[in-house]
Amino acid sequence: MTAHTLRYYERVGLIQPVGRARNGHRRYSEADEAWLNFLHCMRATNMSIREMQKYAALRAQGDSTSLQRRKLLEEHQTGIAEKIAELQKAHDLLSHKIANYKAVEDRTRIGGPRLVEPEEHTELATAS
């Protein structure tokens, strides 16, 4: 995590200011590092800063907010699962297209007939 990100997270209340060494470098505890890792992971999954702030505020209130925190994380997890499903569909489509282009390239190299993509071929067959 960059120094800029750490300063930003302090400014928006996601992390509390930490102690500094004589040279001015921040000194984080293992607990601080675990929290920073969690924040980094949540940003990597596109959790908004606002949602992260909500979670951080609940966390600061202690165990009495565990239900709210769990629900917030479950909602985020559901969104991630939906995004994974969308990405998997896109990945599958790309894999199919790439395989088609490889087949076209192989046929072109050996002088074979031009490959018509299945979607186009199906449309032509039903139009006849």
Image (cartoon, rainbow, N blue to C red):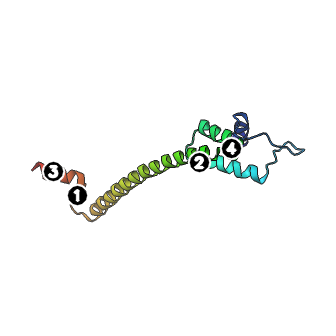
Residue at figure coordinates x 34%, y 57% from the top left: 96
Question: Which comes sooner in the sequence, label 2 or label 3?
Answer: 2
Residue 114, which numbered label? 1
Q: What residue did someone put label 2 on?
A: 70
Comparing labels 3 and 1, the label whose residue is closer to the camera? 3
- Residue 16 placement, left or right of 101: right
Per the model, the C-alpha gap separating discs 2 and 3 is: 53 Å
Secondary structure under badge 4? helix
Residue at figure coordinates x 71%, y 52% from the top left: 34
Residue at figure coordinates x 35%, y 53% from the top left: 93
Question: Which comes sooner in the sequence, label 2 or label 4?
Answer: 4
Per the model, the C-alpha gap separating discs 1 and 4 is: 62 Å
Per the model, the C-alpha gap separating discs 4 and 3 is: 60 Å
Q: What residue did someone put label 4 on?
A: 59
- Residue 111 placement, left or right of 75: left
Compared with 40, 102 (above or below) is below
Per the model, the C-alpha gap separating discs 2 and 1 is: 55 Å
Residue 123, which numbered label? none
Q: Amino acid at mark 1?
A: Arg
Q: What residue did someone put label 3 on?
A: 124
